[in-house]
Image (spheres, rainbow, N blue to C red):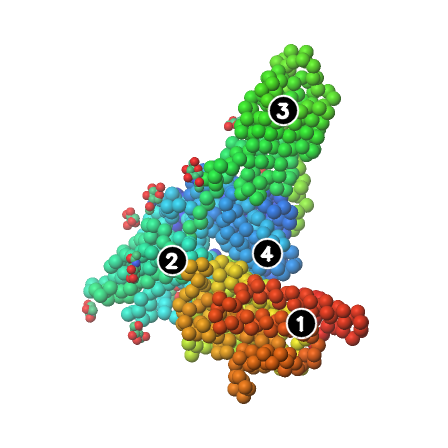
């Protein structure tokens, strides 16, 4: 294994080496901004070995955060991934970068969690560009925790704020920030900025070859195309003329993909997150095969959008010449799945081909940042007084929820830059003179500098700030007179407070000296400012020095890991799947797509590997849908996807391993001997319901599970319940378009009769199925049992309920150990869930509420019992109060 890795590394380096002659003079790497976040300033700058670019420490660009280091086993070839900066304090922490206003930049933020904090729990947080949200970084489900966010953006001022915003309990971090100027005649958009969805080229190499700078002069990273059965790969060693504005690397443009079956169309797709997203696609072509005299390659290109199509008819890729096609106007995809088809024309003798593609979606940045002069002035005030307020980062006024403490702003509408109208720095420990940069806050109405240790004179410029209505300078150490001009303003309504300054001369006679002292005051302002600046530098260095220990030693390079984690998705090769399942040794069960095997990642992390069987009725499209969905959906009560294999004809999904099997096994006692207690059943019901609730109302867009059943509710090693198998989920829309016609799918017995009849999909179909699960939980009876008076569980329960005999309904294994009130309540809930008409069924949030109430009441019942008989029920106590059920309890 080790030698194979060495070979790969060598190949990658050779690939870079042979292409250096392609670097064009045009994009200037000196204009690249490359920050290795968390790097110790003493180890800065250095030359990154793979890209040969110079990376510097981020210490000068952000004021907060601490330095962390990924665990050794997660280290990568790409050196900036070794250390990171994390931000345990404050809600919003920002980088402030100097850029050229109006220049188009490719902005990349890179993340590698690598268990730096030992918590084995990747964080989730938001990234902002100035006042606007850019993206959510979610590393909660990925074991390695790596992500790359890219956007093509034109800053409108010379300072760009890139902020990490805490949105939950986890701590934001960042590994690297990269800015690359682009040509302004490429990647045009009519509005907003372009967020990268994917950038792929025709490579069937599964280890990402890491094509970026210097091969790509703009440092775009090119990933291998998502493979499919249908693709054949071709390449050429001839030089292709790629000197167009898009300028692709030879490695990228010299390869292409064609269909195996020449009569079939060549299709590829990508996904957007929201139905209202607008997308741009860039298709890169060059004919790389030698055509014989009578051969032609000609095809139609079609992208069918929501209300318009992008088509190019009878297209012939130019011979050994790069040509880039793109949609001139933003397109909305049909649903979330965007597909481009290349279809051979009648006169063509050769099948369609494509070399590379890029897909972007538009992100609107509607909110204007604070007026730049106000920003500069208030930053100057902050720096002058060395204020280290954690929330004084990023834009002072926008968005409103992150407005700096002590500042108030005027907001007209979101497109008009907010202005600072009040500044409250009272009791802030200010020392020195009143900062002259305050006068640049030209719309300031209120200024409160009271309760500080300010010295020097009351400056005259305050009188020239026309908007000022209120000035509070009380309880400082100011000296000298009050400027006459300010006294005059007082007569016109300005409210000035100066009490508590013992050395201030308040009598009218002082004012005569006013003019004379003004020059020395300015001089002293300048020297104090210089001193303050020096102190600030010293402070910054002293503060950062003890951090990032051992960073300087990070010059030795490790061989690449088993599989690269550079790409956001975790793709495995088939031989890796064979290895991690030990040649499919242990079967765990059979799911909707095929057989599920036990496996282990790096010999320690158990996983479940679901291999798509050849006879599967669902096939490739469904497989991809499941992968795309699972990669997007994260919730504690949903089984998470660790990775997948998608190599040639081999398809597999790698899930987190659920050590304790499914709910059905535990109800039947098949797994452990004894069956679940009532409180444990309620807890599992609450958790499963929460998973479903998340799919219905927590996810964007909402989703229908379509196959809720007791065998799809799995239990992990801590007996936490999670919903599995989203293979049948399909995104759907709420509101007027609530229903989506689909092929009927699901499991008999759990299937909503209304859905079955109408073939219309609705989230209430899941509620129906969940009602059936609740009945199983109460009765521990099969959903369909031909030998009982009514075969279907819902019908059977209904008859028994009318008889009013609870004992006949409830699972006898519970031994009567339950409160009949809660059981009735759950029965009632289950019956309402299976109402024939979907409109009579409750929503999942409602179901979750009722279940939670019942769990609480059951918990207090057990607590009562325990007080009665301390020793007997101590095990059940763990079941009821902990968030986990300990295995010992069973
Ligand atoms: C931070 O900025 C100072 C002043 O411009 C510079 O001398 C120093 O090298 C910078 N430090 C780093 C780590 O880039
Ligand atoms: C993109 O925008 C630039 C600047 O606005 C313009 O000069 C150029 O023609 C546009 N390019 C394309 C391909 O639309
Ligand atoms: C180019 O194609 C040939 C034959 O199809 C293959 O053997 C070779 O590995 C390919 N080269 C690259 C760099 O992909
Ligand atoms: C390469 O392509 C560009 C853009 O199409 C063209 O202007 C240039 O003449 C071509 N160069 C050669 C050597 O063919
Ligand atoms: C190629 O595709 C056509 C049309 O879908 C199909 O009829 C034909 O059987 C396919 N050929 C092969 C060899 O798979
Ligand atoms: C193209 O020409 C070659 C010989 O030059 C011939 O063998 C072949 O049959 C021709 N193909 C077609 C489709 O005409
Ligand atoms: C887009 O193409 C589809 C299929 O060819 C066609 O049915 C539809 O009418 C077209 N839409 C528009 C807006 O042209
Ligand atoms: C914001 O104000 C500007 C100028 O008054 C106006 O043109 C624009 O339509 C307003 N936008 C909104 C969303 O109200
Ligand atoms: C106020 O702003 C002007 C430009 O708008 C700038 O030249 C000046 O240095 C600023 N003054 C202070 C004290 O920050």
Task: Look at the numbered disc 1 and say if its residue's Cβ is closer than 8 Å to ligand 8.
Answer: no
Total numbered labels placed on residues in the image: 4
Residue picked out by circle 2:
333
Measure the alpha-carbon separation of dots 1 and 2.
Answer: 51 Å
Residue at 63% across / 26% down in the picture?
471
Q: Is residue 607 visible?
A: no
Task: Look at the numbered disc 2 and say if its residue's Cβ is closer than 8 Å to ligand 7.
Answer: no
Locate the N terminus and report the quarter of the image it occupies: bottom right
Residue 408 location in percent, x, y?
58, 36
Of residues 237 and 635, which is closer to you in this image? 635
Local SS, label 3: strand
Local SS, label 2: loop
Other residues around mark 4 within 10 Å, as few (<14) / some (14–19) / many (≥20): many
Local SS, label 1: helix
Residue 821 is tagged as: 1
Residue picked out by circle 3:
495
The answer to whether residue 488 is above or below residue 864 is above
Q: In terms of sequence position, does the residue under pointer 1 or pointer 3 come before the other? A: 3
Residue picked out by circle 4:
123
Q: Nearer the viewer, mark 1 or mark 2?
A: 1
The answer to whether residue 75 is above or below residue 753 is above
Of residues 57 and 386, which is closer to you in this image? 386
Residue at 62% across / 39% down in the picture?
405
| Ligand 6, image quadrant it occupies | bottom left
Q: In terms of sequence position, does the residue under pointer 1 or pointer 4 come before the other? A: 4
Q: In terms of sequence position, does the residue under pointer 2 or pointer 4 come before the other? A: 4
């Amino acid at each position: 294994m080790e030698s194979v890795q060495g070979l790969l590394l060598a190949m990658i380096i050779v690939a870079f080496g042979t292409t250096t002659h392609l670097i064009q003079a045009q994009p200037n790497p000196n204009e690249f901004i490359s920050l290795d976040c968390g790097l110790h300033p003493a180890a800065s700058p250095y030359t990154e070995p793979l890209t040969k670019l110079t990376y510097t420490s981020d210490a000068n660009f952000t004021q907060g955060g601490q330095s962390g280091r990924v665990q050794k086993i997660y280290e990568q070839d790409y050196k900036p991934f070794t250390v990171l900066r994390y931000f345990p304090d404050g809600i919003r922490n920002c980088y402030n970068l100097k850029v050229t206003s109006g220049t188009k930049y490719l902005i990349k933020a890179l993340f590698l969690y690598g268990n730096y904090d030992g918590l084995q729990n990747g964080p989730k947080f938001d990234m902002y560009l100035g006042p606007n949200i850019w993206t959510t970084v979610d590393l909660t489900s990925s074991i390695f925790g790596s992500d790359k966010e890219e956007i093509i953006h034109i800053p409108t001022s010379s300072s760009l704020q890139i902020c990490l915003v805490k949105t939950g309990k986890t701590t934001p971090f960042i590994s690297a920030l990269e800015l690359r100027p682009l040509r302004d005649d490429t990647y045009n958009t009519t509005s907003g900025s372009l967020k990268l969805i994917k950038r792929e080229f025709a490579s069937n190499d599964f280890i990402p070859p890491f094509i970026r700078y210097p091969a790509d002069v703009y440092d775009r990273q090119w990933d291998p195309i998502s493979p499919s059965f249908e693709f054949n790969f071709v390449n050429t060693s001839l030089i292709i003329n790629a000197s167009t504005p898009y300028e692709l690397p030879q490695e990228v443009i010299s390869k292409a993909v064609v269909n195996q079956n020449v009569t079939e169309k060549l299709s590829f797709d990508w996904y957007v997150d929201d139905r209202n997203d607008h997308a741009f696609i860039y298709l890169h072509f060059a004919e790389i095969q030698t055509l014989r005299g009578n051969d032609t390659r000609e095809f139609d290109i079609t992208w069918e959008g929501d209300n318009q199509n992008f088509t190019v008819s009878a297209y012939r890729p130019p011979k050994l010449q790069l040509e880039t096609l793109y949609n001139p106007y933003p397109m909305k995809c049909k649903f979330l799945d965007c597909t481009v088809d290349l279809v051979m024309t009648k006169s063509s003798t050769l099948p369609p081909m494509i070399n590379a593609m890029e897909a972007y979606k538009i992100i609107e940045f509607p909110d204007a940042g604070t007026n730049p002069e106000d920003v500069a002035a208030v930053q100057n005030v902050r720096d002058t007084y060395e204020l280290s307020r954690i929330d004084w980062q990023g834009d002072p006024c926008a968005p409103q929820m992150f407005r700096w403490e002590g500042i108030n702003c005027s907001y007209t509408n979101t497109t008009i830059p907010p202005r600072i109208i009040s500044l409250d720095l009272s009791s802030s420990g200010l020392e020195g003179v009143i900062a002259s940069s305050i006068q640049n806050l030209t719309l300031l109405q209120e200024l409160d500098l009271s309760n500080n240790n300010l010295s020097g004179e009351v400056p005259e410029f305050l009188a020239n700030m026309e908007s000022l209505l209120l000035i509070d300078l009380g309880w400082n150490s100011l000296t000298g007179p009050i400027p006459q001009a300010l006294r005059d303003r007082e007569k016109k309504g300005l409210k000035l407070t100066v009490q508590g300054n013992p050395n201030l001369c308040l009598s009218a006679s002082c004012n005569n000296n006013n003019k004379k002292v003004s020059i020395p005051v300015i001089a002293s302002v300048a020297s104090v400012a210089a001193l303050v600046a020096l102190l600030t530098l010293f402070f910054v260095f002293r503060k950062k020095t003890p951090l990032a220990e051992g960073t300087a030693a990070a010059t030795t390079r490790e061989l690449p890991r088993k599989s690269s984690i550079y790409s956001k998705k975790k793709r495995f090769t088939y031989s890796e799947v064979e290895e991690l399942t030990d040649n499919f040794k242990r079967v765990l069960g059979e799911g909707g797509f095929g057989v599920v095997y036990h496996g282990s990642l790096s010999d320690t992390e158990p996983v479940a590997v679901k291999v798509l069987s050849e006879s599967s009725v669902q096939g490739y499209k469904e497989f991809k849908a499941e992968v795309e969905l699972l990669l997007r959906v994260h919730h504690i009560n949903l089984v998470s996807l660790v990775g997948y294999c998608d190599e040639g004809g081999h398809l597999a999904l790698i899930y987190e391993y659920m050590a304790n099997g499914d709910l059905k096994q535990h109800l039947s006692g098949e797994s452990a001997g004894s069956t679940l207690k009532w409180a444990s059943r309620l807890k599992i019901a609450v958790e499963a319901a929460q998973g479903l609730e998340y799919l219905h109302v927590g996810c964007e867009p909402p989703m229908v599970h379509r196959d809720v059943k007791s065998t799809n509710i799995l239990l992990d090693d801590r007996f936490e319940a999670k919903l599995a198998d989203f293979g049948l989920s399909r995104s759907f829309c709420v509101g007027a378009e609530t229903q989506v016609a689909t092929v009927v799918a699901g499991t008999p017995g759990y299937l909503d009769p209304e859905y079955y009849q109408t073939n219309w999909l609705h989230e209430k179909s899941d509620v129906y199925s969940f009602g059936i699960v609740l009945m199983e939980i109460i009765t521990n009876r099969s959903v369909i049992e031909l030998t009982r008076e009514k075969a279907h569980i819902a019908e059977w329960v209904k008859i028994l309920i009318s008889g009013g005999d609870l004992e006949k309904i409830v699972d006898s294994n519970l031994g009567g150990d339950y409160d009949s009130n809660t059981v009735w309540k759950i029965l009632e809930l289950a019956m309402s869930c299976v109402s024939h008409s979907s409109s009579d069924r409750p929503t999942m949030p409602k179901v979750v509420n009722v279940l939670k109430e019942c769990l609480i009441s059951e918990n207090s019942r057990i607590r009562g019992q325990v007080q009665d008989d301390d020793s007997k029920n101590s095990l059940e106590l763990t079941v009821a109060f902990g968030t986990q059920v300990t295995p010992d309890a069973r």
